[in-house]
Amino acid sequence: MNAQSLSSSTEARQLVERLSSRLENEKRELVLFLIELAELDAKKLALELGYPSTLGCLMNELKLTESSACRRIAAARLLARFPQIGRYLLASRLTLMGLVALKDVLDDSNVDELLERAAGLSEPDVRQLVMRIRLADAATSPRSDVAPGRLRWRLHLPPPWRQIQWPPRRGILTKSSKQ
């Protein structure tokens, strides 16, 4: 190894170490941002600034897009409810997008299990996990307050009338049905 390549590899190593340090700071700042956002949201402080909601405040004051603001509000509410989420965000075991994908299936009884199952997964994989959970819940606990057609819609199944072929093919009618 010559002196020039040793110098450039040393420079590259130092730059990667600085980037790593900045990334750790970014993760901490995200968790702190979410904690403070949860406080702003829970105390409805956006109203004091003249905004009708936290969303309006984030979009106007912080210049966030609507989708970015919604994601952060959802994540802040989840973090306030389940503080253990912070560890997963700090350790890069869960992304902000992955966390928000879990929002409709997390509850007090399953939060630790689902965070572990989602840890390290990409956002599309977390969405797949959520879909499997929803399908399993729908299959194991039929709800009396959901009409059969509504359940079909939630499971993205075609309506029964689309499964019937019309006009009927020859030979479908039996002798007993012709009488």
Image (cartoon, grey):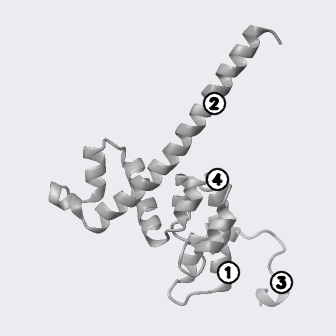
Please state the horizontal and vertical placement of residue 49, each as a whole percent of the image: 16, 55
Residue 139: mark: 1
Alpha-carbon span between mark 1 and mark 4: 23 Å
Q: Nearer the viewer, mark 4 or mark 3?
A: 4
Q: Nearer the viewer, mark 3 or mark 1?
A: 1
Question: Label 2 belongs to which residue?
Answer: 16
Please state the horizontal and vertical placement of residue 8, each as a whole percent of the image: 69, 15
x 51%, y 66%: residue: 103
Foreground of the two, 108 or 89: 89
Q: Element at badge 2?
A: helix
Instruction: Using residue 52 as the reference point, say whether residue 175 is left or right of it.
Output: right
User: Are dots 3 and 1 in contact, CB under 8 Å?
Assistant: no
Mark closer to the chain start, 3 or 1? 1
Q: Amino acid at mark 4?
A: Pro
Quarter of the image for the N terminus: give it: top right
Please state the horizontal and vertical placement of residue 120, each as a whole percent of the image: 68, 55
Q: Amino acid at mark 1?
A: Ala
Q: Element at badge 3?
A: loop
Alpha-carbon span between mark 1 and mark 2: 49 Å
Q: Nearer the viewer, mark 1 or mark 2?
A: 2
Question: Label 4 belongs to which residue?
Answer: 124
Question: Label 3 belongs to which residue?
Answer: 174
Q: Amino acid at mark 2?
A: Val
